[in-house]
Amino acid sequence: MLCGTAPIATLSKRAVSVDFDPSFSVDLGQAQWLQFSYELPGTREELFPPGLHPTTPVVVTLQLWRVANGDLGDFGLAQLRLSCRAGMRIRAFLLQSVIDGDNAARVLSERYAYIPTPGTVHIDRRSDRIEALVSVGGNSVLHAALLKPEGLEVSGLQHIGNMNLAISKGVPQLLQIEPSIATLGLQRGAQQLMSFDAGFWRLPGRTLKHSVIAASADVKLALPPVRYVQDPALSATVGTKEVGFKLDRAGT
Amino acid sequence: MKFGLFFELSVPRPLTRQNEQLAIFNTLEQARLADQLGFDYLWVVEHHFLEEYSHSSAPEVLLAAIAVQTERIRIGHGAVVCVPNINHPVRIAERTAMLDILSKGRLEVGTARSSTWTELGGFCGSPDITKASWDEYVHAIPQMWMRDSFSWDGVTFSMPERNVIPKPYQDPHPPMWVAVTTPGTEMDAAERGMGCLGVSANSFAQQEQTVKRYRHAVRSCNPVGKVINSQVAGMNFMFCHEDRGRAASIGLEMVRKFNYLNTHQLWSREVYPTSSYRTLGNLAPGKGTKAPSDPMEEKSVPEGVTIGCPEDIIRAIKTWESTGVDSINFILNTVETIHQEDVLASLRLFAREVMPAFKSRIKAAGEAA
């Protein structure tokens, strides 16, 4: 069966260190949520650790949050994720993220293993489009637009949780991140990619050609405590354990 | 109670040509044996690009081979994808009519709309219109079969007047079914006078409710063709062995791999926000499967799964029978997990020990009448 082949040691070099607190959660408040989706051509297994399984095909989601008035104040997050499975669970594997807002960057990386690359994350709503602009060090790494947004029932949106690679007490772990997201309004439209720095987003040499669709939503966001972690070298069926209970569910 | 087989053409990695051929020829052998043993139905799915899970992208070709290699088993096109980018409705009417002729009137026509982005995206199809196209197709195809002059001016396809040929062997046309994966679809089937072809795992209680809703609605159906098909079919895994423990260890591995591979499809709803799909579909996590965070916890045969010794299987089928289903279609293998000799032995044992428990009741009921 299909599974990732990326060496854990290589992946771990970019993983952030986390500090588990089974009771920690954060209410992020209201947010603008914007996502662009593209199929990823080419080989896929080498992008994932052995514990995760690529979907056929792999879809890249470029997801932006513009958050206001929550526990972490105003901040923006842009993340690139790859569609995958952890055992039978539908997941997306985090490759790269940009966070503007020092406090948010610290909390989201220390507690949830988002990568705290400093930069700017803008969502610009216009009458006929919604634009995403992400810059790092003054250079644009993403410029995309959702064109001619059309309204859709909020039930049409399926939110997919993350698998974020982290180092905990020196050991690489995949954190199962399950944001609580209430969708308050949803729009959808064709997408246009003006610029995409594949190297920055850790997809060097790759191009995003086959478009899926863009979506925009008004949401209420919260990040509950991390409940499960997975050994990235093992399938979720044997490598998953519950945080805070020291109990390996596979009994190993 | 009738019994059928449900073929996915699942192929193990590495995806070599030899492995594909092995799965296909094993399927043919199972089909011939099932025909001899007295199974009632044989269904072949239509899927595209679903590596490992299903290499059955040209079921009409396989069914043609089965049709000429068998004599009495009914052959099911289960289910043909009713989406313009994948199948034009005229081609469906033409192919199914030819299959019906080759099988001398043994064809059952299942219909579906696909739920994966893997398939729809591969054909550049839109998830938004699949329900509409399916609805148009199931209304149009029976007319193509029956009328010498057919035209259509619709939303998802249109065509000028033509005679769609050949006409089916069964007069007026073969029975039609709807593949039912999510609650509510059975009503789509019932309202149109089409059979309810269950293709996902349900609990007894869920199945009973599905049958109840279906039976109530089909009484006042507005049939899409001239034939009302009011049958309900369930789906199950089957491995029958005298040794209960051996049956469980072999059969559950098949179930585990099937469920695992099934969840690896990229569901449309997962990447494409749409109101057209309310759930992820089929056996996606949370539907008829165990807790995803604990996928290895369950070691014994789950209630209702037809894996075990003949007595276990008879008991499970009787419970399914009590929910009101007319037939059960069995998945026999996944990624060739079970050796072909064991699959064939399982079929023979089922026919010898399990079938009589149900066939005799049918016979007795007929005699009493």
Image (cartoon, coloured by chain):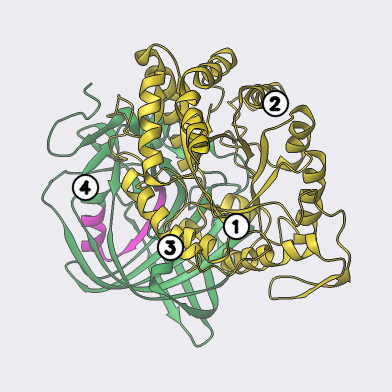
Which residue position is annotated with label 3?
B216
How far separated are the C-alphas under marks 3 and 4?
46 Å
Which residue position is annotated with label 4?
A226
The answer for which chain carries disc 1 is: B
Dot 1 and dot 2 within a common chain: yes
Dot 3 and dot 1 within a common chain: yes
Amino acid on which disc 3 is placed = His
Which residue position is annotated with label 1?
B113
Please, is residue B79 above or below residue B368 in the view? below
How far separated are the C-alphas under marks 2 and 4?
49 Å
Point 52% across, 17% down: residue? B352
How far separated are the C-alphas under marks 1 and 2?
26 Å
Point 66% across, 68% down: residue? B136
How far separated are the C-alphas under marks 3 and 1?
24 Å
CB-based contact (under 8 Å), mark 3 and mark 1 = no
Which badge, 3 or 1, is on the more N-terminal residue?
A: 1
The answer for which chain carries disc 3 is: B
The image shows residue B256 at horizontal and vertical percentages of 41, 30
Label 4: state its secondary structure: loop
Amino acid on which disc 1 is placed = Arg
Disc 2 crowd rating (10 Å Cα; few below 14, some 14-19, many 20+) is some
Which residue position is annotated with label 2?
B28
Point 21% across, 23% down: residue? A251
Q: Residue B315 — which label?
A: none
How far separated are the C-alphas under marks 1 and 4?
37 Å
The image shows residue B317 at horizontal and vertical percentages of 40, 33
Label 3: state its secondary structure: helix
Residue stretch rendered in magenta on the structure: A91-108
Amino acid on which disc 4 is placed = Val
Residue closer to the observer: B96 or A46:
B96
